[in-house]
Each structure stands twice: as C-alpha cells, then as structure tokens.
C-alpha cells in the first residue's frame, strides 16, 4: 500500500534505516529458530517485508495495515499455530 510515509524521500530513507537491522534479526532467527515468524509493524511495511523475505528464509509478514481489522491477524495466527504442530 503506497501511502504517506511509505513513498517518497521519507519512505526511502526510512527503508534504508530499517531494512539492514531487520534483515540482521532474520539472519539471527534462522540460526536460533528457523521456524519462527517475524511480524513487522513499521513503515514502509511493503519494502521492509519484501527485503526480509528476499534476504532470509524466515517467514515475515507486515501487519501494519491490519491493526484496525483484527480478524485477518487472528486467522494468520491460527494458521501459524496449526503449521507449528
């Protein structure tokens, strides 16, 4: 979703600041918990999630735009719990 702080110079700069440490977290998770999910709640959500998925095998999802609609988050959580069994 391209809105507000996800696009333009501000979104690009925020992505450049946030992506490297979040990719590092994914790399750490690969070692200690390869089946983990990483939930992102910060903008630019799309760029961050795409970068984490491309750089790591950790399952990453951005939930920033689902905060106002809890049903999709609940379904995602239930699906993850079923797969973890």
Image: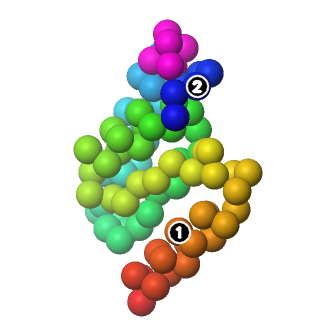
Q: Position of residue 60 (x, y in %)?
A: 41, 54
- Asked if the residue at tag 1 contacts the one at tag 2, i.e. Cβ–Cβ closer than 8 Å, the answer is no
Q: Residue at x 63, y 70 (%)?
A: 74
In the picture, measured across the screen, residue 45 lies left or right of residue 59, that is right
Q: Main secondary structure of the magenta part?
A: helix
Q: How would you rate the neighbour count of disc 1 (Cα within 10 Å): few for under 14, some for 14-19, many for 20 or more?
A: few
Q: For the residue labelled by badge 2, is the local secondary structure a helix, a strand or a loop?
A: loop
Is residue 28 at all visible to an observer of this figure? Answer: no
Q: Residue under label 2, please give it.
A: 3
13, 65: nearer the viewer: 65
The residue at the point 26 percent across, 57 percent down is: 57
Which corner quadrant holds the C terminus? bottom left
Q: How is the image coloured?
A: rainbow
- Front-lying residue, 18 or 66: 66
- Looking at the rendering, which quadrant does residue 37 occupy? bottom left
Q: Is residue 45 above or below residue 4?
A: below
From the top left corner, tell me how far across and down residue 28 is, in percent.
35, 54
Picture coordinates of residue 23, whole percent (x, y): 36, 42
Name which residue lies at 57% across and 72% down.
75
Q: Give the label on residue 76, or none.
A: 1
Residue 29 screen position, x and y as percent = 37, 59
Residue segment shown in magenta: 7-12
């Amino acid at each position: 979703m391209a809105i507000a702080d996800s696009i333009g110079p501000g979104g690009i700069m925020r992505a450049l600041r946030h992506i490297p440490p979040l990719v590092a977290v994914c790399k750490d998770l690969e070692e200690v918990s390869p089946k983990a999910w990483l939930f992102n709640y910060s903008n630019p959500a799309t760029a961050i999630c795409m970068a984490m998925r491309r750089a790591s095998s950790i399952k990453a999802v951005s939930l920033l735009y689902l905060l106002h609609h809890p049903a999709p988050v609940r379904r995602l959580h239930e699906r993850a719990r079923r797969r973890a069994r």
